Image (cartoon, rainbow, N blue to C red):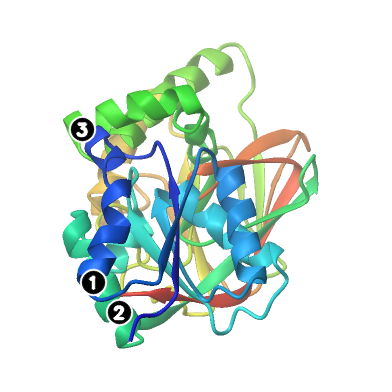
Amino acid sequence: MSRHIDVIATTISGSMRDWGKTKHIVPLFAEHGEDDVRLFTVDSHREARRKACELIRSGSRILISAGGSGTFNSVLEGCYDAQSDLGQVKLGFLRKGSADLIGKVLGMPDEIEAAVEVFVNSIRNNRVIPCDVILATSEAGDSPHRRFVGYGGAELFGEIPHYTENRFIKYYKGILSQLFGDLGPFFVGTNLAIWARFFKSTGRHQRQWRITVDDFVVAHGCFQAMIIVNGDLGPNLPFARSVPLGSGDFYLFTIRDMGTVNLYRQLKHAWDASMLDDPTRWGFESFRVKNRLIIRPDDDGSFPVNVDGSTFECRGSASFEIIDQIHLLTR
């Protein structure tokens, strides 16, 4: 029996090859006997969020995001904007972007034909896993809060989306992804953020941070990166190993500032996980958060927070806590 499935796809995300995936989605579902599939193409994350809200309010219960992490979290936000009971909603991640960490963890193939087949089997057999939803709240700023799953962060991790997420950059991301794989744009964005930090910091005092976990101050100082994950995101972000996405807690990983010269070495040891073997040497610390995480710069100024690939502008402090769970389609 065919089930009603709604797909929200961003027009430009991922590699140039990924741009052509959209036109195949509905025909491929039809080949597997799923004829009740609607495809909605949008040009921005804001449109994806608005469309998801509209679909949930109209009764949609199987919703697939076709894009990258930013599209996926925009669809997630739209689900919550609808103010409906999401207990029966199943949310899917069709990989059509860069990084796609959640999609990879869910076992979704990059090839569109294989991905649709996995979705069909997952939907028919009700293969879902619970995933915690994290609420990020700014003490002050234009937007009071954001919801996300996957990863987030501040300092270097908060600055990377500035170099990867505007519409012009979407085009060069497509070229970089085509040439260097789906992590190509992330590494280019990382390098641009590093050099921007280097030039901005010349002659200035480094920003000091105070980190509070579950009402206890656990760290204070200068950090190159603060990375938040709500579970194991696979080999591309190999910190919270074997922790389920729906564990009920989440983690903060920090990389202390040991100078720009050492930063590249620190990042190398972070990406291959060797940093975990000698954390003190590389300025690496980890904190398990059961209730609430608060990060506050000593100057109470403004700073960007990364919410799974998009920017959330904060001021004063940013707090993070798990507010809900949502069901994700898995292989």
Q: Which residue is mark 3?
A: 178
Quadrant for the N terminus, please.
bottom left
Residue 330's place in the image compared with 94, above or below, is below
Check residue 46 in the rendering and tell me which mark sits there, or answer none: none
Label 1 amino acid?
Answer: Val
Q: Which residue is mark 2?
A: 122
Q: Which mark is residue 118?
A: 1
- Amino acid type, label 2: Ser
Nearer to us: label 2 or label 3:
2
Q: Residues within 10 Å of mark 2 (few under 14, many from 20)?
A: some
Q: Is residue 320 visible?
A: yes
Extreme-right residue of the structure: 140
Tell me the crowding category of disc 1: few under 14, some 14 to 19, or many 20 or more residues within 10 angstroms, Cα based: some
Describe residue 244's horizontal placement relative to residue 322 as left or right. left
Pointer 2 and pointer 3: residues touching (CB < 8 Å)?
no
Marks 3 and 1, how far apart at CA: 24 Å
**Three-letter amino acid code at disc 3?**
Gln
Q: Is residue 255 left or right of residue 118?
A: right
Q: Earlier in the sequence, mark 3 or mark 1?
A: 1
